[in-house]
Amino acid sequence: MNIVYGVSGEGLGHVYEALEIAALLEADGHAVKVLTYGDRAFRSLAAFHPTRIEGVQLCFDSEGLSLWRTFRGSAHCFPFYARNGRRLLRELAGFRPDVFLTAYEPFTTFAAHWMRKPLVSMDNQNELRHMPRPRDAGVFAFHLARLTTQVVTFGAAEYIVKSFGMPEPREKNVHRVAPILQNEIRRLQPTDGSHVLVYLTKPNPDLIEVLKSMDETFVVYCHNRVGEEGNISHRAQGPGYLRDLASCKAILGTTGFSLIADSIYLRKPYFGVPLRKQFEQTHNAVFLKDSGLGEFSEKVTRADLEAFLARLPEYRRKLAAFRFDPAEQEKALRGILAKLQEESARARQGGAPAPDAGSSFRTTQP
């Protein structure tokens, strides 16, 4: 099959997943055309010769996620698609796609509907469609995140939802799975070293000051800053990151879904520092606390971290009992693609349009 794979370039969680998924699809004999945006995502996926598009990049201020800055910083998307939309659609038509796969990337959703091809949505954000507003979650932040997800993944024929806590879905086209992990993560042999790994997607000077005051060793990855600062080692992304991840005694970081999945697989207790006003990060942080696999705080104090580190044996016992299959996601995707391929073949034999080929704008949503 010819598969168009749209990958969100906001953060690197979807990008790291795409490295595994795209390689898997090609190994299965499919032709894959990747669409993505953002320099880091584009470089990371270079082996798949991605087509560069544009997309929303989240912007933050001292209070957390800033809708105004995000809108202003992403306003270039409108003139980009005004100039390049038709060219991109012609390029996709020349690829003769059978299926579109979106990892929270909206242009792919639009293109699938425009070309009347089945769309498969694969992300963790669609869990929002199947849950009530959690306790202490802001009403506006929750409903904004849910609405955004409904728009970005609208009308998919199939939904693959990565989750550790979502109830079993009732809808036949919704598939709850544990997340896929990078092969290099699966190959790691974890040990309990003396350092805490700190992974931040945005600079957090207040947190760094807290870390300096502690009698602990911290290895910090944030925006490729490099250097020594007392008990803190600032390091750039590279081969050393996996070594530091495998040998740390705990993780402290922003609460993206992918790193939490890595931490659970490697049995690393996690102290989450969710980006403020970003509901997905708050939701993931609450999961850590409620499951007993870690703790979180939006404004971390020394007392918070000392209490967390004192409870590492307790978190490790919980982690030892928590199991998930990192092959679930790829099994679900392969099953869906086989089903769509079979339906398409039957439709061609019968001379009728393929089932779901025009399902993209149906009104019933999961």
Image (cartoon, rainbow, N blue to C red):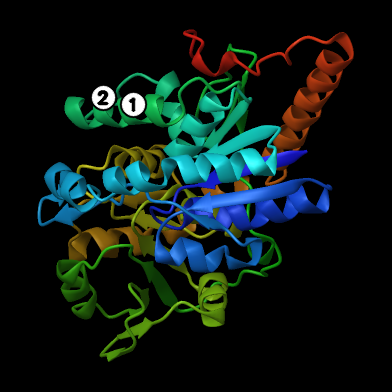
- State whether residue 288 is above or below residue 164: below
Q: Residues within 10 Å of mark 2 (few under 14, many from 20)?
A: some
Front one among 42 and 164: 42
Front one among 16 and 350: 350
Q: On the picture, is 16 further left or further right than 223?
A: right
Residue 53 image point, x, y percent: 44, 51
Q: Which mark is residue 237?
A: none
Quadrant location of residue 85?
top left
Task: Identify which residue is drawn at 46% across, 29% down.
Answer: 153
Q: Residue furthest right?
A: 349
Q: Amino acid at mark 2?
A: His
Residue 65 visible to the viewer: no
Quadrant location of residue 333?
top right
Q: Which mark is residue 143?
A: 2
Q: On the picture, is 27 further left or further right than 32?
A: right
Q: Residues within 10 Å of mark 1 (few under 14, many from 20)?
A: many
Q: Which mark is residue 146?
A: 1
Marks 2 & 1, CB-CB < 8 Å contact: yes
Q: How many marks?
A: 2
Q: Amino acid at mark 1?
A: Arg
Residue 306 image point, x, y percent: 27, 65
Residue 361 image point, x, y percent: 50, 15
- State whether residue 262 is above or below residue 341: below
Residue 1 image point, x, y percent: 78, 38
Task: Identify which residue is drawn at 44% across, 19% down.
Answer: 130
Residue 16 visible to the viewer: yes
Tell me the element at label 2. Answer: helix
Tell me the element at label 1. Answer: helix
